[in-house]
Image (cartoon, rainbow, N blue to C red):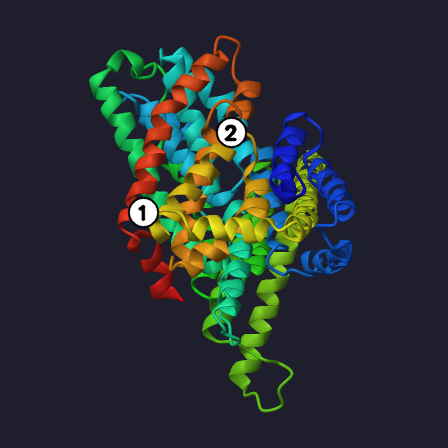
Amino acid sequence: MSAHLDLLMFAALVVAILSGFPVAFSIAGVAVIFAYVGWLAGVMDISLLGAFGQRVFGLISNQVLIAIPLFVLMGALLEKSRIAEELLDTMGRTFGQLRGGLGISVVLVGALLAASTGIVGATVVAMGMIALPTMLRAGYDPRVASGIVCTAGTLGQIIPPSTLLIILADVMSNAYQQAQYEQGKFAVEALSVGQFFAAALIPGLVLVSLYLIYVLARGALRPQDMPPADASLPKPARSEVLGAIVPPVLLIFAVLGSILGGLATPTEAAAVGAVGALLMAGARLGRYRRVIVASAAALILLAVAAGIFPVRLQRGDLGAGSYAAGAAYIALAAIGVIGLLAALRNVLREKVVHEAVTSTMTMTAMIFATILAAGMFSLVFIGLGGEERVAYWLENLPGGATGALLVTMVIVFFMGFFLDFVEISVIVLPLVTPTLILLGHDPVWLGIILAINLQTSFLTPPFGFSLFYLRGAAPEEVTTGHIYRGVMPFIVLQAIGVTLVWLWPALATWLPGVMF
């Protein structure tokens, strides 16, 4: 029995999580219990737990993970200020007269919200409350409608900036460094979040294209499932469409462009995104709109100008042109601050920021508590010999490197039935990815193919989290059975997406190779 404590530990973890006990406490509790059982059985050195303090310090000083609360705040502000709702309504009226038009608009809005929020739960709930009743009133089959809404909401997992990609970049970078040490290299290379954002961009767009092709094909083959919307709904004017689409698109360009262009780190870009979301929310809520728009323009101009012609006012050899540019930059910054204060006053008056901050704190605490608990779990699992067992299994599977990756993909997919993406990312992947990299797989490509697989786990019955989010927001006439059957075709599309990235690795590796 003592020789298999690592396997029993993993089984106990699944049982503890399924019992409904809070996840972080389940992970840490199982780790502590099995640490002492292993110590009493003489198969584990209990002093290994002394390394937990270093792991805690490493987590709280990790510059990459600071981006998570900022990206979550950005998404929460856009959701609570109803910008997402306005975008969905405008797009629905734009495409509604086509067969499957509402479905097309939901997929496109899902992609836009994914790129501007990265929060799956908020996107699924928002679209479940706004788009799903509209689709049902238009005569959509409940299975089709719920499948489209659920799947479009999960795009926040794979389209950057994504919380999953930030966590995955940290995990894969550590695994890559570990693999290099095991190969005898001491001048090791690290991987950045920007590389993973760039790598996920094309696969994310491939998935959006697959969804759109399916919606269009189903609308043509089974028009009774996806009829056109009510013709009496007014089609939005061009100015209304631009007003709904341009601000989120500008925000996406500001965040992703600054990361991929090398102008800012992910943490700095997340701060830009949070400020941009605050300005958008403030402008959406009415008062001081012109001041806020002017300040947003001033901040954009400041970022561009400072990038082209940087000024260091502390230097003593500056000419008149540099001093003039410095004065102009200070004026632009002052206009930006005035607009930010006006936006902040609007969101405070409407209590939008209160809800957004509460939502951000809740989600951030959940993610960081899970990562901390996973650090404890992995220490004990390694102490019980689990890491050596996993490496031995993967290295001796039939099919070599391909067989090992295929088995890992299947295991991750089935774990998605029971565990959230955070738990899988921080517990399971650190155990398998160093060996997979040593077997010859490109770490960036490996990260993206696992990310698409983890995204699929959000959709997979019976425990996919998106299914629960939608169940809570859906009207009464939409049953759990409708939701489960509705996502099945999209799980097949996810499998096609994984296959395409598997067969053509350049889909994931070309863009980061060019940019980094």
What is the x, y in percent for residue 374? 65, 46
Amino acid marked by disc 2: Phe
Q: Residues within 10 Å of mark 1 (few under 14, many from 20)?
A: many
Give the Cα distance between marks 2 and 1: 23 Å
Taking the spot 59% from the left edge, 74% from the top edge, the residue there is: 327
Q: Image quadrant of residue 450?
A: top left
In this view of the protein, can residue 483 be seen by the observer? yes
In this view of the protein, can residue 295 be seen by the observer? no
Q: Earlier in the sequence, mark 2 or mark 1?
A: 2
Taking the spot 43% from the left edge, 25% from the top edge, the residue there is: 149
Of the pair 214 and 176, the residue shown nearer to us? 176
Taking the spot 53% from the left edge, 69% from the top edge, the residue there is: 181
Residue found at the far left of this picture: 221
What is the x, y in percent for residue 6? 63, 43
Q: Quick check: 389 left or right of 36?
A: left
Residue found at the far bottom of this picture: 317
Of the pair 8 and 491, the residue shown nearer to us? 8
Q: Image quadrant of residue 141?
A: top left
Q: Nearer the viewer, mark 2 or mark 1?
A: 2
The C terminus lies in quadrant: bottom left
Q: Residues within 10 Å of mark 2 (few under 14, many from 20)?
A: some
Of helix, strand and loop, which one carries label 2?
loop
Q: Quick check: 6 left or right of 22?
A: left
Q: Which residue is mark 2?
A: 417
Amino acid marked by disc 1: Val
Of helix, strand and loop, which one carries label 1?
helix
Q: Which mark is residue 501?
A: 1
What is the x, y in percent for residue 307? 48, 70
